[in-house]
Amino acid sequence: MQAVAPKFGIRFTATAAKCLAIAALTMTAVAVRADEVGDVQKLLSAGKNTEALQRADQFLAARPRDPMMRFLRAISLSQAGRIPESITAFTKLTEDYPELPEPFNNLAVLYAQQGQYDKSRNALEMAIRTNPSYATAYENLGDVYAKLASQAYSKALQIDTRSAVAPKLAMIRDLFPKERGGTAVAGLTNSSAPSTTPAPAPAPLPAPTPTTNKPAPTPAPAPVAVSKPTPPAPAPAEAKAEAAEREVESALQAWATAWSKKDLNAYFAAYSRDFNGGKSRKAWEQERRERIQGKRNISVKLSKIDVSINGNKATARFRQDYKADSLDISSGKRVELVRTGGEWVIVKESTGS
């Protein structure tokens, strides 16, 4: 399902994994909610906004604070062209759930479509402040700054046609030759796809020996026992790379464990001293400390870890399952690490990669 197509490249993001939901009281309630969310997403995908709104309103009449359904309702309003109502819906979401970056991002999209780039910039800055690793918001913010620059250069040319900004204006316009489509709103999908690797064919059975009236042949002399050669040991470089990958994976698991236990000393030690999340190190640590200590319970689990090594640098991609109080997030993550003092530490992280 495509979100509202932006006019200059800024994108909606609304995956079900990233759009958080309040935990249900029973397994039955969870299943019912998942079915309702999936049904509304299918209606939106089919362009049936009126029906999607009706289903969303029926659901929200009983559970008015459900953030996922409210998010889908706001998407539906935007797709139906009811932009002021969609802006109101997203604004209310940012007020009720300020920890979620996606409503800020989508609110910025709607402002940008109306040419309100200052409001769009403010909303994106809030999205980034909420999640410093939100790559889409950074990309959108870059587009907004480019449009603001385009407006400024155009104004300069209106005032002075001899101005040297014409090449700069042309360069910025080249950045947006076509509109980019919005990011698809994913439904509730099963992340584990079945394996398509065919099983090896069974070895054929030996053909039976035919019975004949010929005398039995003289048995061949017993073969001389020959010791099998020992398989070659892995090349030193290969073994070293495998060991480094295991070290990176262990470092990431230790980081997730420290986060889960709210062990802030170990958590901050997992990051490079140069890591600051887009602000001063002190401000970043203070923000993370407040967020982590403000949760009663935290659970962070990593799976499907894929590590690539290049000298003293490493890149890891994995699935992160984060649960904290009423929040439940499952998303892809990309982390860059460097080896310092014999330890692998995080220098960059981004969500949704």
Image (spheres, helix red, strand yellow):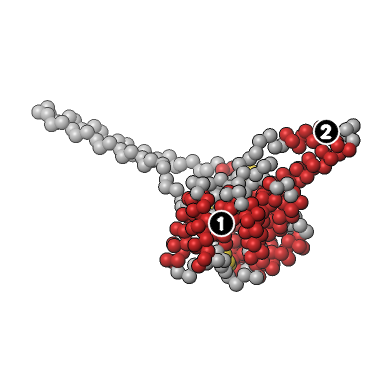
In this view, 284 is above or below 167: below
Q: Earlier in the sequence, mark 2 or mark 1?
A: 1
User: Is 325 on the left or on the right of 165, as rendered?
Assistant: left
Q: Which residue lies furthest to the top in this view?
A: 214
Q: Is mark 1 on a helix, strand or loop?
A: helix
Q: Which amino acid does label 1 sit on?
A: Arg
* Label placed on residue 350: none
The picture places residue 41, in percent across and down from the top left corner, at 50, 52
Q: Residues within 10 Å of mark 1 (few under 14, many from 20)?
A: many
Please name whichever residue, 120 or 27, is drawn nearer the observer in this view of the structure.
120
Residue at 24% from the left image edge and 32% from the top image edge = 220
- What element does badge 2 sit on? helix
Does the CB distance between marks 2 and 1 fall below 8 Å? Answer: no
167 on left or right of 210: right
Q: What residue type is labelled 2?
A: Ala
On the rendered structure, is 274 left or right of 337?
A: right
State the residue position of label 1: 73
In this rendering, would 328 be left or right of 190?
right
- Residue 351 lies, in percent from the top left, at 62, 52
